[in-house]
Image (tube, rainbow, N blue to C red):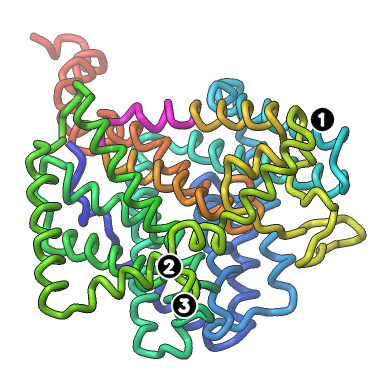
């Protein structure tokens, strides 16, 4: 049986991460040294590559009001990704293709359709290559980890996640640093939306642990779940709220329909907890009269008072972009308009080049389904659906609902932030966490548990002793 959730947190690592964060806030030299160290570490082995990618991306998307980045930071972050890809390709095995082939198929089809239609072919091909190699590198690194080492990498990722969330909460003491331009909490990341989508998978993991796992949740675990929900609300990131809610609902439904219920609590627990929480919110609303106003402000963030209805809120947030993407899809419904580009070929944020080669051309596309229809048409959408279903098939192999919820939340954040297709940027965090969830079932296998190995060893000892005993010893 897996260990209780909060034993998966390393307080020593959390302290080291906090110290590292403080050093990054002091001097830009610290970020340069850290990124160089990450690039070198990524070449060492699979676990180091995964950790290096995580730390480098968090540094790259750190809050500029807190962290001082060096002039070469953007190039060094790319170097870390390149090092991780090179290391992963050196570890590639034929058996890995059983998980990776849909990603390769999607990459080939996206490249072909982009050659036919993209207004910026070079940029599209660069992004196809980045997507295919970066996402594959993450999964290869996880596949190369021995099952016995997976619990340790789980501890590492959960500790990093909750440390970032905790440090972001502390920035509330200095609103000038921790509050973004839209009034939402951005913490130690560069914008509230980034913090929200970072929190969502960890929130889904902790909430599912409290509601759906058979073991009794500790007080600390309960406070982590509550704190994650509160911080999502403070970020004003509706995408994160939707992703977390949908993730918990889907795994609850899967719990109700599944016959494999080991480690899982009775459905009576989530019903009771949700009922008590709803009652508490209702009492607070009646007592203060402010809960309704706060939730309305969260739902209609940025919408003028006189225009507040669901239609206007949708149009002002993602609706206009979704409709525009749909119209572009109708112009080229089969092959789309080119991977990772706008149909007009323009890049409002500019194109970053190194030695004349484009290495970055940021775009913002919120809703993944219409984004892929715009970029890849029906061919790209079908290929991407295959990728997602193939990954989900692996994520569902384990019976621990926390990892399933984390996986669904990683997909769910793409209803407002299309990071799934951008592992060359902040989307690599999404892929790293998804990779963690895909391999979670292996961490529950007998050979991954030290206590199981300890039980097996004494059973094998007599046979081993007889094989190596001197003649006559048996007598």
Distance in Å between CA atoms under marks 1 and 3: 43 Å
What residue sits 14% from the left and 46% below the top? 270
Give the x, y percent position of residue 72: 74, 73
What residue sits 28% from the left and 37% below the top? 251
Distance in Å between CA atoms under marks 2 and 3: 34 Å
Q: What element carries label 1?
A: helix
Q: Height in image: 460 above or below 141?
A: above
Give whichever of discs 2 and 3 has the lower sequence position.
3
On residue 21, the disc is 3
Magenta-drawn stretch contains 168: no
Q: In this view, does 225 lie to the left or right of 317?
A: left
Quarter containing the N terminus:
top left
Q: In this view, does 388 lie to the left or right of 148?
A: right
Instruction: Name the quadrant containing residue 198.
Output: bottom left
On residue 112, the disc is 1
Q: Residues within 10 Å of mark 2 (few under 14, many from 20)?
A: many
Residue nearest the observer in this picture, 230 or 390: 230
Q: Where does the magenta region start and end? A: 391-400
From where the camera sits, is residue 14 visible? no
Q: Tell me the residue that label 2 is attached to.
A: 300
Image depth: mark 1 or mark 3 in front: 1
């Amino acid at each position: 049986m897996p260990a209780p959730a909060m034993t998966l947190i390393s307080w020593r690592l959390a302290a080291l991460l906090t110290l590292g964060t403080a050093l990054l806030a002091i001097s830009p030299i610290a970020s340069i040294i850290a990124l160089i160290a990450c690039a070198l570490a990524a070449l060492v082995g699979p676990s180091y590559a995964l950790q290096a990618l995580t730390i480098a991306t968090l540094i790259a998307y750190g809050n500029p009001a807190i962290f001082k980045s060096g002039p070469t930071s953007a190039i060094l972050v790319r170097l870390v990704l390149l090092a991780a890809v090179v290391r992963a390709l050196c570890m590639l095995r034929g058996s890995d293709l059983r998980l990776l082939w849909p990603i390769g198929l999607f990459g080939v089809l996206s490249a072909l359709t982009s050659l036919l239609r993209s207004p910026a072919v070079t940029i599209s091909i660069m992004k196809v290559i980045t997507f295919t190699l970066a996402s594959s590198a993450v999964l290869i690194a996880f596949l190369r980890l021995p099952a016995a080492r997976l619990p340790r990498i789980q501890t590492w990722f959960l500790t990093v996640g909750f440390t970032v969330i905790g440090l972001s909460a502390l920035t509330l003491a200095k609103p000038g640093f921790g509050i973004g331009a839209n009034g939402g909490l951005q913490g130690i990341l560069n914008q509230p939306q980034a913090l929200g989508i970072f929190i969502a998978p960890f929130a889904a993991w902790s909430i599912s642990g409290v509601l759906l796992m058979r073991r009794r949740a500790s007080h600390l675990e309960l406070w982590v779940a509550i704190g994650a929900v509160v911080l999502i609300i403070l970020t004003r990131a509706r995408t994160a709220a939707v992703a977390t809610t949908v993730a918990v609902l889907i795994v609850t439904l899967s719990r109700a329909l599944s016959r494999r219920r080991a480690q899982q609590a009775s459905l009576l627990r989530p019903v009771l907890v949700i009922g008590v929480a709803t009652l508490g919110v209702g009492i607070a609303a009646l007592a203060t009269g402010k809960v309704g106003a706060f939730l309305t402000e969260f739902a209609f963030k940025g919408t003028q008072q006189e225009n507040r209805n669901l239609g206007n809120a949708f149009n002002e947030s993602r609706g206009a972009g979704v409709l525009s993407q749909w119209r572009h899809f109708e112009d080229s419904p089969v092959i789309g308009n080119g991977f990772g580009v706008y149909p007009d070929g323009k890049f409002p944020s500019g194109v970053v080049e190194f030695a004349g080669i484009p290495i970055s051309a940021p775009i913002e596309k919120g809703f993944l389904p219409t984004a892929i229809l715009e970029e890849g048409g029906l061919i790209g959408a079908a290929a991407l659906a295959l990728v997602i279903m193939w990954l989900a098939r692996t994520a569902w192999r384990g019976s621990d609902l926390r990892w399933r919820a984390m996986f669904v939340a990683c997909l769910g954040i793409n209803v407002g932030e299309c990071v799934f297709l951008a592992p060359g940027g902040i989307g690599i965090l999404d892929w790293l966490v998804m990779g963690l969830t895909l391999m979670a079932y292996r961490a529950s296998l007998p050979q991954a548990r030290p206590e199981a190995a300890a039980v097996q060893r004494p059973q094998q000892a007599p046979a081993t002793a007889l094989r190596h005993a001197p003649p006559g010893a048996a007598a």
